[in-house]
Image (cartoon, rainbow, N blue to C red):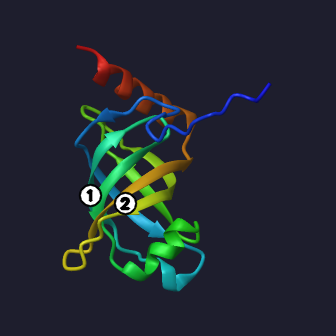
Amino acid sequence: MPSPSRSFDPERREFVRVRADLPVKYKFLSQDGGLASDEIFDGTTSNISGAGILLVGQMPNSDWITGLLMERIVVGINLFLPGAEEPVKALTRTAWIEALDERSQRCSMGLRFKEITKEHLDRLFKFVIRAQMP
């Protein structure tokens, strides 16, 4: 008897995603000084889940794309949830990058949480759950 095949579903997610347009401050970090910047950037989310965020923001150097995708560069984020006094802080890895506009250097980046405290992850989960309620 042939084994059942498993199809790949690109929309199958580990966590529920919610649409959210929230402010994010972020910074590119690397052990290699040429692949990072001390500058803090302002961006926004497009959606959020317990696994990561979709960040829309500036990438100061298109040469960093390979470093981001190979985790030689990570992204530190401060995500500002509505009504919260302190941002959710996390270190993220870049899962994918889409639509880099050469003029504005803005793009969409799928960021997955690499390091996040339990407290900050709990705050994020509570936000995602509340966002799904009518």
What secondary structure is found at the residue carrying circle 1? strand
Q: Hey, which residue is sitting farthest bottom in the picture?
A: 34
What residue sits 26% from the left and 61% below the top?
Answer: 42
Q: Hey, which residue is sitting farthest front in the picture?
A: 1
As drawn, the label of residue 7 is none
Name the residue beneath numbered marker 1: 43
Name the residue beneath numbered marker 2: 26
Residue 43: x, y in percent? 26, 57
Give the left or right position of residue 119, taking residue 127 as reference. right
What residue sits 28% from the left and 62% below the top?
Answer: 57
How many numbered marks are there? 2
Check the image and report above or below for 126 versus 18: above
Instruction: Check if mark 1's residue and mark 2's residue have beta carbons within 8 Å.
Output: yes
Residue 129: x, y in percent? 37, 21
Check the image and report above or below for 70 versus 87: below
Q: Quadrant of residue 65?
A: bottom left
What residue sits 48% from the left and 36% below the top?
Answer: 120
Locate the C terminus and report the quarter of the image it occupies.
top left
Residue 106: x, y in percent? 25, 68
- Kindly identify the amino acid type of the residue bearing the numbered disc 2: Tyr
**Cα gap from disc 1 to disc 2, whole angstroms:** 7 Å
Q: Residues within 10 Å of mark 2 (few under 14, many from 20)?
A: many
What residue sits 35% from the left and 27% below the top?
Answer: 127
Q: Quadrant of residue 8?
A: top right
